[in-house]
Amino acid sequence: MTQSILFVCLGNICRSPSAEAVLRAKARDRGLELTLDSAGTGDWHVGEPPYGPMQKAGAARGYDLSGLRARQVSVEDFYRFDLILAMDPSNYANLEALRPEDATARLEMFTAYLDEPGVSEVPDPYHTRDFDGALDLVERAAEGVLGKLG
Ligand code: 4NP
């Protein structure tokens, strides 16, 4: 049974903290107890709160990202979590390269939980500047994750 999920993007200041916050809110609404965390494949923003415009877009929908702090994904995460969800194919490839042979975590794409053929990534809003579009996708994929968990 999946009880712990780690969301991973590049910087851990936009997509993955948003996914963590959205899943936390939706799990709470359903009375589900899940261990949730997020991390980045890169280390540029370690220790920083989520990006201001991302926090603002999240807050407008009732998601409080302010207490989160960026960290870099580590090999240990492959033993600590049941499921690791990558935000885009590049994140996935970097995670695959890091994954130890005896990892206990499953590694999947977050977008695999969308019932939307052709959508294969959550586009990086740090570059697209489409924070609401990223949140829309994250919210739909989060519903898919919870639907799979039952
Ligand atoms: P994220 O967005 O991976 O969704 O957190 C990014 C944030 C920062 C950078 C890249 C992506 N950056 O290059 O600093």
Image (cartoon, helix red, strand yellow):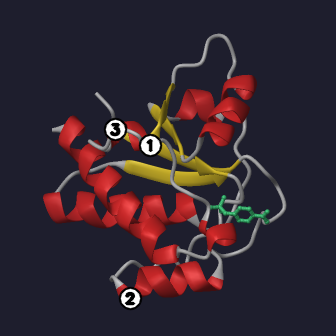
Left/right of residue 10 with respect to residue 133 in the rendered view: right
**3 vs 2, front mark:** 3
For label 2, being within 8 Å of ligand 1 is answered no
Q: CA distance from mark 3 to mark 1?
A: 13 Å
Q: Residues within 10 Å of mark 3 (few under 14, many from 20)?
A: few
The image shows residue 117 at horizontal and vertical percentages of 34, 38
* Quadrant position of residue 68: bottom right
Earlier residue among tags 3 and 1: 1
Q: Residues within 10 Å of mark 2 (few under 14, many from 20)?
A: few
Please count the marks in the image: 3
Answer whether residue 49 is visible to the viewer in this image.
Answer: yes
The image shows residue 115 at horizontal and vertical percentages of 26, 42
Q: Secondary structure at mark 3?
A: loop
Residue type beneath disc 3 = Pro
For label 1, being within 8 Å of ligand 1 is answered no
Q: Which residue is mark 1?
A: 110
Task: Residue at 55%, 34% (x, y): give it.
Answer: 80
Left/right of residue 61 with respect to residue 31 in the rendered view: right
Residue type beneath disc 1 = Phe
Ligand 1: quadrant of the figure:
bottom right
Could you say which disc has been placed on residue 60 in the image? 2
Residue type beneath disc 2 = Ala
Could you say which disc has been placed on residue 58 in the image? none
Q: Secondary structure at mark 1?
A: helix
Q: CA distance from mark 2 to mark 1?
A: 23 Å
Left/right of residue 89 with respect to residue 85 in the rendered view: right
Q: Which residue is mark 3?
A: 117
